[in-house]
Amino acid sequence: MKTIIVEETGPPEVLKLQEVDKPKPAADQVLIRVEAISVNFADIKARQGQYHGAAADTAFTPGLDCAGVVVEIGDQVSRFQAGDRVMAFPSGGSYAEFVVAPENLTYPVPNEISSETAAASLTVGITAYNVIQKMARLEKGETILIHAAAGGIGSTAIQLAKLLGASKIIGTVGSDEKVAKAKSFGADEVINYRSTNFVEKVNELTGGKGADVILDTVAGENFERSLKCLAQFGRIVSFGHANDGSIPGIAKTDQLHSSCRSVIGYSTGTYRKNRPEFLREAAEKIIEYLLQKQLEIVISKSYALEDASEAHAHIESRTSIGKVLLIP
């Protein structure tokens, strides 16, 4: 079968298509014929050697999630059988024609939902739902600030925030083109952070109160500035480091205790490894929202598997909108 292998970290060109043996499922795994693969920003970080889930100096196949059809099951698998349509977090990467995935990280896909939508929805849907509902515990009537609002997670988070009761949704983006896109997803106000001081604007839009919830995938200075527009009793969820060099952000305790504000860390990858069952509720809710047409997963581009390097370059250009897919 064909798969993408990264033998050394570096630019998109290190993504190489290779022929390897088809994997065999272990007792608790399913073998999936892949029909669509999601490209996530974590894949880029892994390719660059900056993602916590990738071992240094070890060849690997990138990719967090995919959708397809079960072709074989392990002896201990009871929830799936050959022919079932599924989306999954595979073991060993998803940029391949066939993957194996643990049963407890595999989820059924109804016939009404395409494999492309299922693949595109898994990481961004679970992540957006969990950071809003489980981590920040958004309450009805609160204001939420979503950074990178035109991206895969941002476009999904805007829609979920509205479904979960936010009264005002503010987004930040890096271009005027993305301002219009983020508004089309349902954001009430969108700020181009390259031309406008987002801290001042958020405080202005909230009458000086600040946002009750802030979703930050950027980290570094962006995180530190966000604290300056976080309301009393507010919660900022840090769940990525999309800035160049993965520079961390710093919070001082005196910015937190007297104002009863909270900094919350989240990683879908850490939950996958250590508490996989925690993810099931979010996966089921995302499928429910998709079936009820309350949620649209925005897919802007699809590439052939062998063109994975082009997909990465497109995302790194910071011009991508919504999700990007690979099709084996």
Image (tube, grey):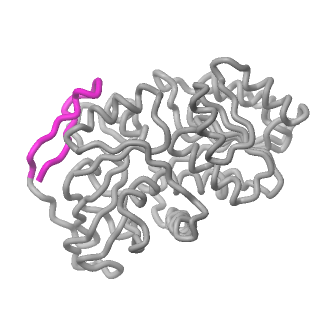
Residue nearer the viewer, 91 or 37: 37
Locate residue 291 relative to residue 199 in the image: left or right: left
Is residue 245 inside the magenta stretch?
no
The furthest residue to the top: 195
Placement of 30 over or under 60, stated as above or below: below
Residue range in magenta is 1-20
User: Percent position (x, y) of residue 325?
Assistant: 35, 46
Q: Position of residue 184 (x, y in %)?
A: 63, 44
Q: Quadrant of residue 311?
A: top left
- State the residue lying farthest toward the bottom: 78
Judged from this view, the residue extending furthest toward the right is 207
Q: Residue 254 versus residue 313: which sits nearer the camera?
A: 313
The magenta stretch spans residue 15 = yes
Question: Residue shown at 49%/38% (left/top)?
Answer: 321
Q: Quadrant of residue 119?
A: bottom left
- Tell me: residue 169, above or below residue 121: above
The residue depicted at 22 percent of the width and 63 percent of the height is 33
Q: Position of residue 268 (x, y in %)?
A: 49, 51
